[in-house]
Amino acid sequence: MNMVAENIKRLRERVAEAAIKAGRAPAQVKIMAVTKTQPVRLVNEAIAGGITLLGENRAQEFRGKYDEYDRRGEVEIHFIGHLQTNKVKMVLGKVSAIQSVDSLKLAKEISGQGAKLGITTDLLLEINIGQEESKSGIAPDEAEDIIRRIAVLPNVKLRGLMAIPPVWRESEDNERFFAQMEKKFVDIREKKIDNISMEILSMGMSDDFAPAIKHGSTLVRLGSAIFGQRH
């Protein structure tokens, strides 16, 4: 078994353990392999190792690698990086979801381009839960208003929320942001807004997926834990 396959096997066990500890079924948490800067060879090793969900960060890098990915029809691909409106065309139709919707303007562009192609794209609204100036995302108190505006757009379907909390030295500090995201997710879901399903809460990365799972994450985005540190 190669290193990537071994890492995936270990991660499945750790994710399952975190879910069970949180009183959840392991099947409720999906593992995404984040492919940023990773060569196609390693991404295909991850697919061979059982990964069925890829996360792409950069539109141009993704376009350059897409045709070489194995089992493209079977493996789901989400775009998770900052996406400029002028690059929407580069990813639409190749990804099933865009997790990093950080403005109404971007959602409208995805909707408009989707109408031209005759496709509907799943979206997640990116929440800037730490309200950091250096990060993109919607302020938590503006989320519901933006969601209601996205709900009426054609050719898109908002299916949940995504967040990248601030990096703190102590995991307890980071955990409070996951708790805030869980509350926001549940509050919006309970409002039962038309065309909004709130099925996916995407949070938790290689260093902090356990507390994210504790607070309801349904999708963890793992890069270095699968592929090793980037060089």
Image (tube, rainbow, N blue to C red):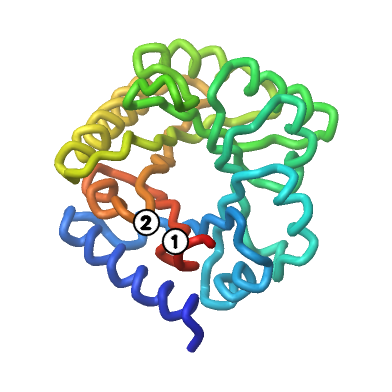
Q: Nearer the viewer, residue 192 or 15?
A: 15
Q: Residue drawn at (58%, 77%), measured in percent from left and top?
A: 48
Give the residue displayed 30% in from the left and 63% down from the top. Answer: 15
- Per the rendering, the mark at residue 224 is 1
Dividing the picture into quadrants, the one containing residue 19 is bottom left
Q: Residue at x 36, y 19 (%)?
A: 140
Q: Which mark is residue 206?
A: 2
- First in sequence: mark 1 vs mark 2: 2
Q: Residue 229 at x, y = what percent?
A: 46, 63
Q: Are marks 1 and 2 in contact (CB under 8 Å)?
A: yes
Of residue 189 and residue 224, the one placed in the foreground of this image is 224
Residue 192, percent across and down?
A: 40, 23
40 sits left or right of 45 in the view: right
Q: Residue 44: where, in percent of width, then height?
A: 64, 72
Q: CA distance from mark 1 to mark 2?
A: 6 Å
Q: Is residue 36 above or below residue 196?
A: below
Residue 107 lies in what quarter of the image? top right
- Name the mark on residue 113: none
Mark 1 secondary-structure assignment: helix
The residue that appears at 29% across and 51% down in the rendered structure is 208
Q: Is residue 146 left or right of residue 172?
A: right
Looking at the image, residue 222 lies above or below residue 94: below
| Residue kind at label 1, given as amino acid type | Ser
Taking depth in this image into account, of 18 and 61 the one nearest to the observer is 61
Kind of residue sitting beneath label 2: Ser
Would residue 99 be found to the left or right of residue 203 on screen?
Answer: right
